[in-house]
Amino acid sequence: MDSEKLDLGADPSLLLVDDDDLFLKRLAKAMEKRGFEVVTAGSVAEGKTAALRGPAFAVVDLRLGDGNGLDVVEALHARRPDCRVVVLTGYGAIATAVAAVKIGAADYLSKPADANDVVNALLSRSDALPPPPENPMSADRVRWEHIQRVYEQCDRNVSETARRLSMHRRTLQRILAKRSPR
């Protein structure tokens, strides 16, 4: 499925909402290669405004700088109830997954998700479980990604990050000094 044009039906419109600009641009480019007509938004406010266009598909980050992505999901479904929405998050929790599905999300994926996972979630129409990912991240990579996200949220403050992760500061410094695992 890598970057081949897909049969998306009569309306290939896709709204991507994420405050991680680099991730947003990469995902937008990958989705355009697959035939989607992409509109991007970097905040809840921009997402709600873009939702007024009534896209057929949407990928929404759960936590945005100005609020909760579930507000965008609600706006999307108010405008177009058949919109297929996938919620992305770096903070996977059962409670938020249930909340996302209850308000109409078709699926819930943990970040970083690749374009193929997102497309599979957007286009799946059955109630069957999706197939497992072809190249899942290693446990070391998931741990490293989580530490990096918390580190960035703490404005790259090692002491605050270590406190939030219940980790010794020196241990965290050693982890941050290493390259990312595969």
Image (cartoon, rainbow, N blue to C red):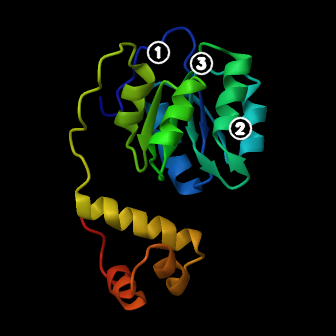
Q: Quadrant of the N terminus?
A: top left
Give the residue drawn at x 41%, y 50%. 112
Amino acid, disc 3: Cys
Give the residue drawn at x 55%, y 47%. 24
- List x then y, in percent, for residue 94: 45, 41
Q: Which residue is mark 3?
A: 83
Farthest residue, direction top: 10
Amino acid, disc 1: Leu
Lateral position of residue 151 relative to residue 147, left or right? right
- List x then y, in percent, for residue 145: 38, 63
Kindly identify which numbered label has been placed on residue 8.
1
Q: CA distance from mark 2 to mark 1?
A: 22 Å
Report helix, strand or loop for mark 2.
Answer: helix
- List x then y, in percent, for residue 174: 33, 86
Q: Residues within 10 Å of mark 1 (few under 14, many from 20)?
A: some
Q: Residues within 10 Å of mark 3 (few under 14, many from 20)?
A: many
Q: Which residue is mark 2?
A: 47
Amino acid, disc 2: Gly
Q: CA distance from mark 2 to mark 3?
A: 14 Å
Is residue 3 at least partly visible in the picture? yes
Give the residue drawn at x 64%, y 22%. 55
Q: Residues within 10 Å of mark 2 (few under 14, many from 20)?
A: many
Quarter occupied by residue 6: top left
Farthest residue, direction bottom: 170
Q: Quadrant of the C terminus?
A: bottom left
Give the residue drawn at x 29%, y 62%. 141
**Number of numbered callouts drawn:** 3
